[in-house]
Structure formats: C-alpha cells, structure tokens
Image: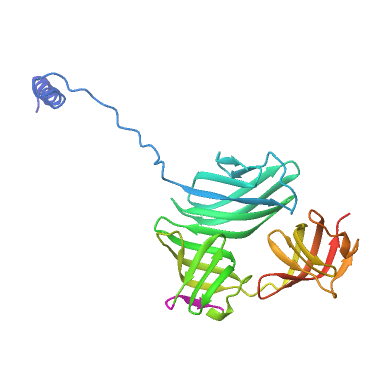
Amino acid sequence: MTTSRGHSLVILAIAALTAAACSGRDGTPAPISPSPLVSPSASSGATVSGIVNIDNRTLPPGMIVTVAGTEIAAPVDSSGHFSLDGVPPGDIQLRFTNAGVDAAIPIQGVAEQEQIHIAVTVSGGSATMTSQQRTDSQHRVGSHGLVSGLSGTCPDLTFTVNGTTIVANASTIFEDGSCSTVQNGTRVEIKGTRQSNGSVLATKVDIDEPDLDIDLKGTVSGLGSACPSLTFTVRGTSVVTNSATRFTDGPCSAIQNGTRLEVEGTRQANGSVLAHEVDIDR
C-alpha cells in the first residue's frame, strides 16, 4: 500500500521534471510560444477571368460577378472584362447581376492554381459560355472555341483559338475528324502544353460537329462593297450578302456602320457567314 508520504514524493518528482523541461539551460523558465496560425497561401485557389457580352447590346455599368456561396466578387469593366482570384477548387457557379440581369453559369472541376478564361453571353436570366480556356499548374492547357488565322499544311498547322496560338504537328491526335477538317470557323477542343513563347503545342484536337446555321445579333462595322453584295462584321464575324439575301424591316441600302440588325445564315469554310436573311432594327 502506498502511503500519503509516498504520494507526496511522487508528485514532487513529477513537478521537478516538468520544471526542468520548461526551463532553459541556465535554469530560467523557457518562454511558451503559441502555435503559429496557418495562413492560406497567396498562390492557392484558381483565377477565373473573362469577358461578358450582354445580349449583343452595350454593356451597362455596374455589373458584378460573384462565386456563388462565397464572398469572392469582382466588377465587370466598361469593356466587359472581369477577374476573380482565390476561387476555391471544385464545382463552382458564377453569378452575373445588374439591373435587369441575374444569370449564372457552372464551371466544373476547378483546380488550385488553375487559370480559367471564359467568354459569356448574358441575356436577362440566362447565360451561355461561348468559349473557355483552362491552364493548370503544370502548364497543361484545355481550350474550346473557334479556329481562326489558320496557316500551314497538315500535319503542321498553326491557328488561333480564344486568342491563343495553337501549333499541331505529326504527334497531334485528331478526333472526330482529320487534320484536313480543321478550317477557319471550325469549333474545336484543344488539349496541349503551354510553350515558353506562349503558344500551345496541341497533343489532341477534338473537332466538333460544325454548326452551320448561324444567328447573329449586333451592330454593323467595317461595311464594304455595294448592294446587294455587302460585306460587314457583326460581333467579330464577317457577314456576306448577295442577290439571294432577304432584307426585312428595311432595304439593303439602309445598312450602315452602326446599324443594329439580326443575321440568319450559314457558316462558310473561311469562317464567314453567308446571310440568308437580314432583319434591320428600327
């Protein structure tokens, strides 16, 4: 049986050992520091940037983009651009709000340190992502959009998608079509690796089924030639009319730079649109 005196000796021994452990080499008590707080890395999270088009109209001021369920938000500037930093990984939803606008789009599988650039068209309560480019921390790129500036001969092609130069070579895999299928205006999905000069070396080019029926709404610019054979640009797309084109709500001669109209037509191999009908806004 342990006596009360024995208990006292044990307690004193433990106290002495504890004091020694908490003392410096000279016997003075060592300071006790709190555990350091773990701060999130400035490089964590993804960056989501892009450009917004409001139903083919002039962008009104005051639009805000938010990551739903978070406090992450950014304004959309007068040219339609925005940028969000520190976006959490996973499936997210971007919400676009302004007077008369409340729309959202999903972005799936966001990864830490990923850079995502999108183009979005918003109309009232709906939003459509028209292009997307993603670059992960290993410089691997995924891009979805229309081909432009095509040059070279198969298999060595150079073209642009979403403002990025894409390079294809003999090692590039073409899916849902051949190398020769790639033309200006072709919608493609690219997977590849970012090069030191900023271009992307394509490991795979997935060719989408062509969307030949086009409906464009916007303002005329770059008007050239004479009726009925006009050439002009709407939302960055070249439009061509001819003697078979129907003009509604106004004659061909009513079309001027700055005229608002709607074009229905067919995508051509060179990326332009041959207009079947041009509806002129009044």
Figure quadrant of residue 137: bottom left
Task: State the residue at coordinates (16%, 20%).
Answer: 29
**Vertical placement of 150 versus 56: above or below?**
below
Which residue appears farthest toward the front when viewing the image? 225
Residue 199 position in % (x across, y down): 46, 62
**Vertical placement of 249 versus 72: above or below?**
below
**Vertical placement of 191 versus 127: above or below?**
below
Determine whether, in the image, residue 227 is placed left or right of residue 178: right
Asked if residue 163 lies in the magenta stretch, the reply is no
Q: Which of these two is toward me, 58 or 134? A: 58
Q: Which of these two is toward me, 192 or 252? A: 252
| Count of numbered tags | 0
Task: State the residue at coordinates (64%, 54%).
Answer: 120
Q: Which of these two is toward me, 72 or 225? A: 225
Quadrant where the N terminus is found in the figure: top left
Residue 209 position in % (x across, y down): 63, 75
Quadrant where the C terminus is found in the figure: bottom right
Magenta residues, start to end: 170-176
Determine whether, in the image, residue 100 is placed left or right of residue 279: left
Q: Which of these two is toward me, 144 or 220? A: 220
Q: Which color mode does the image show? A: rainbow
Figure quadrant of residue 107: bottom right
Residue 100 position in % (x across, y down): 76, 44
Task: State the residue at coordinates (70%, 40%).
Answer: 61
Determine whether, in the image, residue 21 is placed left or right of residue 277: left
Residue 230 position in % (x across, y down): 79, 67
Task: State the residue at coordinates (51%, 75%).
Answer: 152
Asked if residue 173 lies in the magenta stretch, the reply is yes
